[in-house]
């Protein structure tokens, strides 16, 4: 049996297929090698395929998002939600708590009476 020799063409094919999420066994079938031989000769292509593919998609999305028209708006909204953590749900504005009643305030004052005093360490809640 002849030993497999990777070519520039098979390297590009493996990297592209790995980027598309094709299983190693299927990639090996296409180029005519076992999964073991595939991993042995194409380690870099298998490891970087998804990075290259994601980069191409991101580049295209960015191009669309910074363009004009309906698609640009949709792409820009998606980009900002994912990359800039924007949300259509506005953060709730802090509200001023309702004033405590006399009984509630008296209880709170009693619970916190020892705070900041020289005998505060003797009182446990």
Image (cartoon, grey):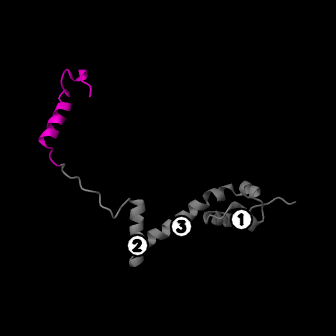
Say whether residue 79 is left or right of residue 1.
left
- Residue interval drawn in magenta: 98-125
SS under mark 2:
helix
List the residue tagged with mark 1. 26
Locate residue 76, reporting x and y percent.
39, 69
List the residue tagged with mark 2. 74
Identity of the residue drawn at 77% across and 59% down: 34
> Extreme left residue here?
102
Say whether residue 75 is left or right of residue 5.
left
Q: Earlier in the sequence, mark 2 or mark 3?
A: 3
* Separation of residues labelled 3 and 1 (CA atoms): 23 Å
List the residue tagged with mark 3. 56
* Separation of residues labelled 2 and 3 (CA atoms): 18 Å
SS under mark 3:
helix
> Extreme bottom residue here?
69
Q: Nearer the viewer, mark 2 or mark 3?
A: 2
The picture quadrant where one finds residue 2 is bottom right
Identity of the residue drawn at 65% across and 56% down: 44
Say whether residue 28 is left or right of residue 104.
right
């Amino acid at each position: 049996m002849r030993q497999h020799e990777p070519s520039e063409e098979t390297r590009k094919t493996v990297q592209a297929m790995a980027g598309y999420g094709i299983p190693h066994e299927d990639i090996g079938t296409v180029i005519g090698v076992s999964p073991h031989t595939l991993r042995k000769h194409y380690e870099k292509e298998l490891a970087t395929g998804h990075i290259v593919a994601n980069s191409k998609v991101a580049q295209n999305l960015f191009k669309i998002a910074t363009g004009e028209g309906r698609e640009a708006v949709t792409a820009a909204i998606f980009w900002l939600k994912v990359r800039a953590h924007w949300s259509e749900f506005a953060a709730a504005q802090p509200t001023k708590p309702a004033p405590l009643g006399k009984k509630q305030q008296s209880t709170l004052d009693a619970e916190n009476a020892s705070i900041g005093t020289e005998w505060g360490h003797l009182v446990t809640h």
